[in-house]
Amino acid sequence: MQSAAAAEKNEIRRRALAARAAIGKDEHQAASWHAVDRLRPLVKAGDVVALFWPMRGEIDPLGLIATVRARHGEIAMPDITGGTMVFRRFDGVTVVPGPHGTRNPPASEPVCEPALIVAPLAAFDRAGGRIGYGGGHYDRAVQRLRGRGHPVRVVGMAFACQEVDRIPVEDHDATLDAIVTEKELIRVKDGL
Protein backbone atom coordinates (compact mmCIF):
# COMPACT_ATOMS: atom_id res chain seq x y z
CA MET A 1 0.00 0.00 0.00
CA GLN A 2 1.27 3.45 -0.96
CA SER A 3 2.05 5.93 1.84
CA ALA A 4 0.29 9.29 1.99
CA ALA A 5 3.59 11.05 1.18
CA ALA A 6 4.15 8.80 -1.86
CA ALA A 7 0.61 9.45 -3.12
CA GLU A 8 1.09 13.20 -2.65
CA LYS A 9 4.42 13.03 -4.52
CA ASN A 10 2.77 11.19 -7.40
CA GLU A 11 0.14 13.91 -7.75
CA ILE A 12 2.75 16.68 -7.54
CA ARG A 13 4.87 14.86 -10.15
CA ARG A 14 1.89 14.49 -12.48
CA ARG A 15 1.02 18.21 -12.32
CA ALA A 16 4.62 19.42 -12.66
CA LEU A 17 5.32 17.14 -15.63
CA ALA A 18 2.14 18.35 -17.33
CA ALA A 19 3.35 21.95 -16.91
CA ARG A 20 6.75 20.97 -18.33
CA ALA A 21 5.12 19.22 -21.30
CA ALA A 22 3.33 22.45 -22.24
CA ILE A 23 6.64 24.23 -22.92
CA GLY A 24 7.22 24.88 -26.63
CA LYS A 25 10.42 23.88 -28.45
CA ASP A 26 11.81 27.43 -28.81
CA GLU A 27 11.03 28.30 -25.20
CA HIS A 28 12.60 24.99 -24.09
CA GLN A 29 15.88 25.74 -25.83
CA ALA A 30 16.09 29.36 -24.63
CA ALA A 31 15.20 28.36 -21.06
CA SER A 32 17.88 25.65 -21.07
CA TRP A 33 20.56 28.14 -22.08
CA HIS A 34 19.46 30.66 -19.44
CA ALA A 35 19.57 27.95 -16.75
CA VAL A 36 23.03 26.82 -17.88
CA ASP A 37 24.23 30.44 -17.61
CA ARG A 38 23.08 30.44 -13.97
CA LEU A 39 24.95 27.16 -13.35
CA ARG A 40 28.33 28.35 -14.68
CA PRO A 41 29.42 30.18 -11.47
CA LEU A 42 28.98 26.95 -9.47
CA VAL A 43 31.62 25.07 -11.49
CA LYS A 44 34.98 25.20 -9.72
CA ALA A 45 38.35 24.56 -11.36
CA GLY A 46 39.01 20.84 -11.70
CA ASP A 47 35.49 19.74 -10.67
CA VAL A 48 34.07 16.46 -11.83
CA VAL A 49 30.55 17.54 -12.80
CA ALA A 50 27.76 15.00 -13.27
CA LEU A 51 25.19 16.08 -15.84
CA PHE A 52 22.25 14.14 -17.27
CA TRP A 53 21.18 13.36 -20.82
CA PRO A 54 17.81 15.15 -21.13
CA MET A 55 14.78 13.01 -21.93
CA ARG A 56 11.00 13.40 -21.95
CA GLY A 57 11.14 17.20 -22.23
CA GLU A 58 13.66 17.76 -19.42
CA ILE A 59 15.63 21.00 -19.36
CA ASP A 60 18.97 20.52 -21.13
CA PRO A 61 22.18 20.88 -19.05
CA LEU A 62 24.61 19.86 -21.82
CA GLY A 63 25.54 23.47 -22.61
CA LEU A 64 27.61 23.36 -19.41
CA ILE A 65 30.14 20.92 -20.89
CA ALA A 66 32.32 23.65 -22.46
CA THR A 67 32.53 25.53 -19.14
CA VAL A 68 33.58 22.42 -17.22
CA ARG A 69 36.27 21.64 -19.77
CA ALA A 70 37.51 25.25 -19.86
CA ARG A 71 37.98 24.99 -16.08
CA HIS A 72 39.96 21.74 -16.49
CA GLY A 73 37.20 19.58 -15.07
CA GLU A 74 35.62 16.34 -16.21
CA ILE A 75 32.07 15.44 -17.15
CA ALA A 76 30.30 12.42 -15.73
CA MET A 77 26.85 11.00 -16.41
CA PRO A 78 24.67 8.67 -14.35
CA ASP A 79 24.53 4.99 -15.21
CA ILE A 80 22.16 2.59 -13.48
CA THR A 81 23.54 -0.92 -13.35
CA GLY A 82 21.81 -3.61 -11.33
CA GLY A 83 19.58 -1.01 -9.71
CA THR A 84 22.51 1.11 -8.45
CA MET A 85 23.36 4.53 -9.87
CA VAL A 86 27.01 5.32 -10.43
CA PHE A 87 28.58 8.19 -12.35
CA ARG A 88 30.77 7.35 -15.34
CA ARG A 89 33.19 9.58 -17.21
CA PHE A 90 31.53 11.10 -20.28
CA ASP A 91 33.55 11.98 -23.38
CA GLY A 92 30.94 14.51 -24.48
CA VAL A 93 29.71 12.38 -27.36
CA THR A 94 29.28 8.64 -26.74
CA VAL A 95 26.10 7.46 -25.04
CA VAL A 96 24.30 4.13 -25.08
CA PRO A 97 20.67 3.32 -24.26
CA GLY A 98 20.03 2.84 -20.55
CA PRO A 99 17.02 1.82 -18.47
CA HIS A 100 13.75 3.78 -18.62
CA GLY A 101 14.72 5.62 -21.82
CA THR A 102 17.91 7.11 -20.38
CA ARG A 103 21.19 7.55 -22.25
CA ASN A 104 24.48 7.05 -20.44
CA PRO A 105 28.17 6.48 -21.10
CA PRO A 106 29.17 2.92 -21.97
CA ALA A 107 30.10 0.57 -19.11
CA SER A 108 33.70 0.67 -20.35
CA GLU A 109 34.04 4.25 -19.04
CA PRO A 110 35.48 4.58 -15.52
CA VAL A 111 33.31 5.39 -12.50
CA CYS A 112 33.88 8.91 -11.09
CA GLU A 113 32.94 10.63 -7.86
CA PRO A 114 31.50 14.03 -8.82
CA ALA A 115 32.08 17.19 -6.83
CA LEU A 116 28.92 18.68 -8.37
CA ILE A 117 25.82 16.75 -9.42
CA VAL A 118 23.29 18.49 -11.65
CA ALA A 119 20.13 16.46 -11.13
CA PRO A 120 16.95 16.47 -13.21
CA LEU A 121 13.74 17.32 -11.42
CA ALA A 122 10.10 16.47 -11.94
CA ALA A 123 9.22 19.04 -9.25
CA PHE A 124 10.97 21.07 -6.55
CA ASP A 125 10.38 23.50 -3.71
CA ARG A 126 12.51 26.36 -2.37
CA ALA A 127 13.58 24.36 0.68
CA GLY A 128 15.51 21.91 -1.52
CA GLY A 129 12.80 19.26 -1.72
CA ARG A 130 13.00 17.28 -4.95
CA ILE A 131 10.80 14.85 -6.79
CA GLY A 132 12.32 12.77 -9.55
CA TYR A 133 10.65 9.90 -11.34
CA GLY A 134 10.15 7.80 -8.22
CA GLY A 135 13.06 5.35 -8.40
CA GLY A 136 15.16 6.98 -5.67
CA HIS A 137 18.38 6.48 -7.65
CA TYR A 138 19.75 9.99 -7.08
CA ASP A 139 18.79 9.89 -3.39
CA ARG A 140 20.71 6.66 -2.82
CA ALA A 141 23.71 7.76 -4.92
CA VAL A 142 24.04 11.05 -3.02
CA GLN A 143 23.63 9.32 0.34
CA ARG A 144 26.28 6.76 -0.62
CA LEU A 145 28.77 9.47 -1.65
CA ARG A 146 28.14 11.58 1.44
CA GLY A 147 28.21 8.48 3.64
CA ARG A 148 31.79 7.85 2.47
CA GLY A 149 32.67 11.45 3.38
CA HIS A 150 32.75 12.66 -0.23
CA PRO A 151 31.78 16.36 -0.30
CA VAL A 152 29.30 16.47 -3.17
CA ARG A 153 27.14 19.47 -4.01
CA VAL A 154 23.75 18.70 -5.56
CA VAL A 155 21.95 21.22 -7.75
CA GLY A 156 18.56 20.43 -9.19
CA MET A 157 17.79 21.78 -12.67
CA ALA A 158 14.28 22.35 -13.96
CA PHE A 159 11.96 24.86 -15.57
CA ALA A 160 10.47 27.47 -13.23
CA CYS A 161 6.97 26.09 -13.94
CA GLN A 162 7.96 22.89 -12.07
CA GLU A 163 8.19 24.70 -8.73
CA VAL A 164 5.61 23.80 -6.10
CA ASP A 165 4.92 25.20 -2.64
CA ARG A 166 6.02 22.12 -0.71
CA ILE A 167 7.50 18.71 -1.41
CA PRO A 168 6.80 16.09 1.25
CA VAL A 169 10.33 15.06 2.25
CA GLU A 170 10.79 11.58 3.70
CA ASP A 171 13.79 10.23 5.64
CA HIS A 172 15.30 8.60 2.54
CA ASP A 173 15.11 11.77 0.40
CA ALA A 174 18.33 13.68 -0.30
CA THR A 175 17.62 17.41 -0.36
CA LEU A 176 19.20 19.80 -2.84
CA ASP A 177 21.90 22.37 -2.10
CA ALA A 178 20.48 24.65 -4.80
CA ILE A 179 18.01 24.73 -7.69
CA VAL A 180 18.59 26.41 -11.02
CA THR A 181 15.85 27.41 -13.46
CA GLU A 182 15.76 29.71 -16.47
CA LYS A 183 14.72 32.51 -14.10
CA GLU A 184 16.99 32.16 -11.07
CA LEU A 185 19.50 30.30 -8.95
CA ILE A 186 17.91 29.36 -5.62
CA ARG A 187 20.60 28.75 -3.00
CA VAL A 188 19.25 26.43 -0.31
CA LYS A 189 22.45 25.75 1.64
CA ASP A 190 25.39 28.00 2.44
CA GLY A 191 28.82 27.33 0.98
CA LEU A 192 27.69 26.48 -2.52
Image (cartoon, rainbow, N blue to C red):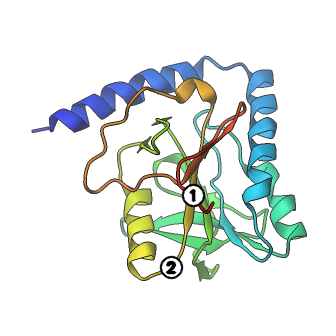
- Left or right: where 122 falls relative to 173: right
Mark 2 is on which residue type?
His
Residue pictured at 75% horizontal, 73% vertical = 74
Q: Which residue is mark 2?
A: 150
Q: Which residue is mark 1?
A: 190
- Left or right: where 22 falls relative to 8: right
Answer with the quarter of the image where residue 14 lies. top left
- Left or right: where 167 falls relative to 108: left
Question: Where is residue 77 drawn, in percent x and y?
Answer: 62, 64
Question: Where is residue 49 drawn, in percent x and y?
Answer: 68, 66
Disc 1 secondary structure class: loop
Quarter holding the C terminus? Answer: bottom right
Q: Residue furthest right?
A: 70
Q: Residues within 10 Å of mark 1 (few under 14, many from 20)?
A: few
Question: Where is residue 125 drawn, in percent x and y?
Answer: 46, 35
How far is disc 1 from disc 2 in space, using C-alphas?
A: 17 Å
